[in-house]
Amino acid sequence: MKRVFLFFFIAVFSATGFAQHCPFDGSTMLVVKLTDSKGDPVTSMRDSLFLAEVDNPKPDSCSFAKGILILPFKNLQEGLLNKYEGARKNWAVRLSAGSEFMNPGHFAVVLNQAEHNCMITDKDDYRYIQRKFIIEIKQDNVVRPLAEVPSENFYSLCTNAGLWTRIKSMEIIIK
């Protein structure tokens, strides 16, 4: 009986060692603050703004997010808070309270782990290759680049990484 209990005890704790430790584990977010040429916040986009992947020599080798990624920026209500349901949504509301990025003029893209890093299957594991991104805008059916996105502008949403008030936005001027 002692062996059965010991086996059960070890099995339970070894299984939970690999479990997700927070509701946003593996998720990252890029926030932009859009302003016009006068420095006033742009609160609604009439043009489409995208996070576009660049310089990926083997995009179809990425597991779970194949191909070159082109992800739309959304307002924070839609792109962050309404992205989740139930307890995860309550966490997102609580964690984003008081954050600068919740002010007017801010838009975001939330990426999962496979979108942030190209995960290439390597036997029973994955190799991670960090993806590179630029911000593009589509105005009058013409797509043009606005800015390169440094890797440090992506913030982990996992609570182990710190409070969400640490998240800073990239300022983009829309002409």
Image: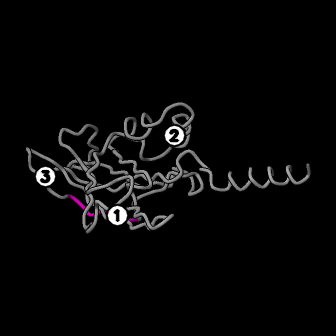
User: Label 3: few (<14), some or many (≥20) within 10 Å?
Assistant: few
The local secondary structure at tag 1 comes to loop
User: Label 2: few (<14), some or many (≥20) within 10 Å?
Assistant: many
Q: Are marks 2 and 3 in contact (CB under 8 Å)?
A: no
Residue, disc 2 = 92
Where does residue 149 sit, x and y in percent of width and height? 31, 62
Question: Relative to the observer, which residue lies in front, 62 or 161?
Answer: 62
Extent of the magenta region: 146-151
Query: How far apart in space, not on screen, are marks 2 and 1 (Cα)?
Result: 25 Å
Where does residue 129 sit, x and y in percent of width and height? 39, 68
Looking at the picture, the colour scheme in use is one colour
Where does residue 2 sit, x and y in percent of width and height? 91, 52
Earlier sequence position, callout 2 versus callout 3: 2
Q: Residue at x 15, y 48 (%)?
A: 138
Question: Relative to the observer, which residue lies in front, 109 or 9?
Answer: 9
Query: How far apart in space, not on screen, are marks 2 and 3 (Cα)?
Result: 32 Å
Residue 129 left/right relative to 50: right
Q: How many marks?
A: 3
Name the front one of labels 2 and 1: 1
Residue, disc 1 = 131
Amino acid type shown at disc 2: Ala
Residue 41 left/right relative to 86: left
Label placed on residue 143: 3
Residue 1 sits above or below residue 61 on the image: above
Furthest residue to the top? 86
Where does residue 33 sit, x and y in percent of width and height? 32, 49
